[in-house]
C-alpha cells in the first residue's frame, strides 16, 4: 500500500482529497447555524461529527498540500471539535440526568435537580465560549478561505476549481 508521501502530490490523489475535504468543510459550515441557534442540542453534536470527519480526511491528505496554508486550516478543523466539546459534554450529561431523574426517589431527585441546575449554568458559560470561537472563525473568513482553497462542495466542479 502506498503512503501519501509516495504519491504524486499533484495527481489524482490530491484532486480526490481536495474534493473530499471540500465536502467535509461544507458539512461543518452547514451544521454551524443549528449549533449557534442553540435550539437543538444535536446541532453541536452534528458540527463535532462533521469536524471529526474533516480532520480525518485532512490527516490523510496533509502531505499533498502546501504546509504554509494547509496547517492553519487543519488546526481550525481540530479546534472546532475541541471548542464545541464542553457544550456537547454538558448536553450529554443533562440528557442522562434528566432521564435518570424519572427513575429515582423524590429524595434523590432533589440532588439530581441541583446537579442539573449546576450543569446548565456550566453549559451557558461553555456555550458563550463556543459562540465567541465561532464568531472569530466568521470574522477571520475561515469559511471563505476553506472554499477558496478546496472549493465549494455545493457548486458543480468544486474539486477542480479550487486553487492550491
Image (cartoon, rainbow, N blue to C red):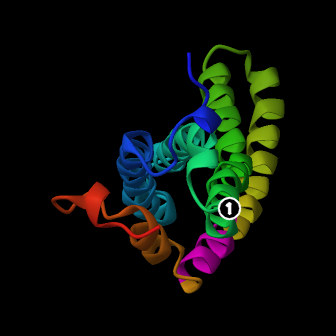
How many marks are shown on the rendered structure? 1
Magenta stretch containing residue 84, yes or no?
no
Q: Which of these two is toward me, 117 or 50?
A: 50
Vertical comparison of 125 with 110: above or below = below
Vertical comparison of 132 with 101: above or below = below
Measuring 63% from the left and 41% from the top, which residue is drawn there? Answer: 59
Q: Which of these two is toward me, 135 or 97?
A: 135
Vertical comparison of 109 with 105: above or below = below
Quadrant (top left, top right, bottom left, bottom right) of the N terminus: top right
Which residue is under mark 1?
67
Q: Which of these two is toward me, 28 or 60?
A: 60
Percent x, y of residue 97: 69, 29
| Residue segment shown in magenta | 130-138
State left or right for residue 111 relative to residue 151. Answer: right
State left or right for residue 117 relative to residue 143. Answer: right
| Residue found farthest to the left | 156
In what element is the residue under mark 1?
helix
State left or right for residue 137 relative to residue 157. Answer: right
Magenta stretch containing residue 137, yes or no?
yes
Percent x, y of residue 37: 45, 65
Secondary structure that dominates the magenta span? helix
Amino acid at each position: 500500500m502506498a503512503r501519501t508521501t509516495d504519491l504524486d502530490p499533484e495527481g489524482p490523489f490530491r484532486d480526490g482529497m481536495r474534493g473530499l475535504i471540500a465536502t467535509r468543510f461544507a458539512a461543518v459550515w452547514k451544521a454551524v447555524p443549528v449549533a449557534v441557534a442553540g435550539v437543538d442540542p444535536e446541532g453541536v453534536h452534528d458540527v463535532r461529527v462533521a469536524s471529526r470527519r474533516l480532520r480525518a480526511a485532512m490527516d490523510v491528505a496533509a502531505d499533498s498540500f502546501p504546509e504554509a496554508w494547509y496547517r492553519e486550516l487543519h488546526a481550525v478543523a481540530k479546534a472546532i471539535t475541541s471548542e464545541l466539546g464542553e457544550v456537547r459534554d454538558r448536553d450529554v450529561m443533562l440528557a442522562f440526568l434528566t432521564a435518570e431523574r424519572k427513575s429515582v426517589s423524590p429524595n434523590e431527585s432533589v440532588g439530581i435537580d441541583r446537579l442539573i441546575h449546576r450543569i446548565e449554568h456550566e453549559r451557558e458559560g461553555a456555550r458563550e465560549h463556543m459562540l465567541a470561537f465561532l464568531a472569530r472563525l466568521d470574522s477571520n473568513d475561515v469559511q471563505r478561505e476553506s472554499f477558496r482553497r478546496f472549493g465549494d462542495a455545493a457548486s458543480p466542479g468544486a474539486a477542480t476549481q479550487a486553487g492550491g
